[in-house]
Image (cartoon, rainbow, N blue to C red):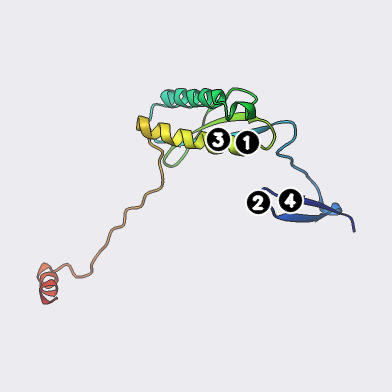
Amino acid sequence: MRMTVVRDIEGTVHFIPNGQITAVSNLTQEWSRALFDISVAYKENVDQVLDVLRALGNELRSDDAFMPMILEDLKMLGVEAFGDSAVVIRFYIQTWPGKQWDVKREMLRRIKNRFDELHIEIPFPQRTVVLRHEDHDPKKAGSDSQAA
């Protein structure tokens, strides 16, 4: 039986019988894209956030360490979605093959640091825990604590 052998980004080797192959995806042919979906709180000024992201893209492209990896300026796609607790902004940076992960990690680091500086909130799920006691008699509660 003929097989195709591929190794994924984590190093796992996959053996695929040729008869089972129906589609092939290549993340590193000719060029790649680092795709970003950045969530910001609803209270944030979206236009300001777009400007901040564009500026960070320009800074990254001007950085001597990342300039050789990036093929084009950041391409802002705009507001992608209204999530449960965030406005999602989508953009991408076109890179040389295989460099999208380096560019993405550095861009995310810069976004986090700049958002912290500018007090732009990146929302995250939060839970409120309410503890209820069956016995609401303050005298009993007080007597229990005095006995201890």
Q: CA distance from mark 1 to mark 4?
A: 18 Å
Q: Is residue 52 left or right of residue 99?
A: left
Residue located at (54% from left, 32% from top): 90
Percent of width and height locating residue 45: 39, 26
Front-most of 108 and 148? 108
Q: Amino acid at mark 1?
A: Gln
* Residue topped by disc 3: 36
Q: In whole angstroms, how far apart are the C-alphas of marks 1 and 3?
A: 11 Å
Among the 4 quarters of the image, the one containing residue 122: top left
Tell me which residue sits at (36%, 29%) in the image: 118
Pick the quarter of the image with the C terminus.
bottom left
Q: CA distance from mark 2 to mark 3?
A: 21 Å
To which residue does mark 4 refer?
7
Label for residue 55? Answer: none
Give the numbered dot on residue 10. Answer: 2
**Residue in the picture at 60% in, 29% down:** 93
Q: Earlier in the sequence, mark 2 or mark 3?
A: 2
The residue that mark 1 highlights is: 100
Note whether 49 is above or below 102 in the view shown: above
Q: Earlier in the sequence, mark 1 or mark 3?
A: 3
Up-down: is 57 above or below 146? above
Q: Is residue 42 visible?
A: no
Q: Which amino acid, mark 2? A: Glu
Q: Residue at x 60, y 34 (%)?
A: 34
